[in-house]
Image: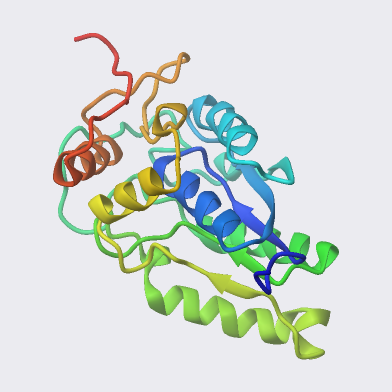
Amino acid sequence: MNAAASKPAVVLLSGGLDSATVLAMARAAGYACHALSIDYGQRHGAELAAAARVAAAGGAASHRTVSVNLDAIGGSALTDSLIAVPSAPSAGIPVTYVPARNTVFLAIALGYAEVLDAAAIFVGVNAVDYSGYPDCRPAFVDAFQALARVATKAGVEGHAPRIEAPLLHLSKADIVHRGVALGVDFGLTVSCYNADPLGRACGHCDACRLRADGFAAAGVADPTPYVPA
């Protein structure tokens, strides 16, 4: 039996392609996966509805959503309706970057992991085919792991949960291949920054571009529903 089989893990689940693949990978590794989604005041609720679908289809042991309301501080096109979502790639870190988002998400996951006595926290950050967000890089993951060792009861007792980022060095095509091999139904997922209430993708934002390019490079049919032109 896999050594992880009896151990719980927290899986941050956004409802997108990457986190759906991470859930499948954690399940395949034998973890009892407790999916955690964050309602952070994002532009639309379609991804949260997708997260619920993915958790159910992906065999999560449980799924809960925590509200944080990062829209109270704004500063991002994803949390401030007055900032438009770009329809073309931009130089530098784009306005879709949400200040401190992954730090906040992992902090909540860290607390939940302590409650569950979880061995690991899985997060779908990626530093290959990504938008250049600073909190998706290896240095960020390493720094948060160090924090987990000193900021929690579990950490100071010598058994901090591991921060698992299995997609960190994979291309989007690689991620698609992993997901397909593990039976992920990508048609359940929503990645678009500007999806409509039905979860249909805009086809123009950075997330849509990366997702479409990934399916194309993988040679896999793209199941994404798009808003009619």
Instruction: Name the quadrant containing residue 215.
Output: top left
139, above or below 40, in the image: below
Who's the residue at 38% across and 38% down the image?
77
Who's the residue at 53% across and 29% down the image?
50
Q: Residue 196 placed where, x, y %? A: 41, 17
Looking at the image, residue 161 sits to the left or right of residue 173; the answer is right
Q: Residue furthest front?
A: 1
Q: Residue 83 placed where, x, y %? A: 35, 34
216, above or below 169, in the image: above
Q: Residue 146 placed where, x, y %? A: 59, 85
6, above or below 226, in the image: below
Q: Nearer the viewer, residue 104 or 61?
A: 61
Who's the residue at 52% across and 55% down the image?
101
Looking at the image, residue 83 sits to the left or right of residue 131; the answer is right
Who's the residue at 58% across and 29% down the image?
53
Q: Nearer the viewer, residue 62 or 42?
A: 62
Q: Residue 138 placed where, x, y %? A: 39, 75
Looking at the image, residue 161 sits to the left or right of residue 209; the answer is right
User: How many marks are shown on the rendered structure?
Assistant: 0
Instruction: Name the quadrant containing residue 37.
Output: top right
In which quadrant will I find the C terminus? Answer: top left
In which quadrant will I find the N terminus? Answer: bottom right
Looking at the image, residue 210 sits to the left or right of residue 105; the answer is left
The colour scheme is rainbow
Q: Residue furthest top?
A: 228
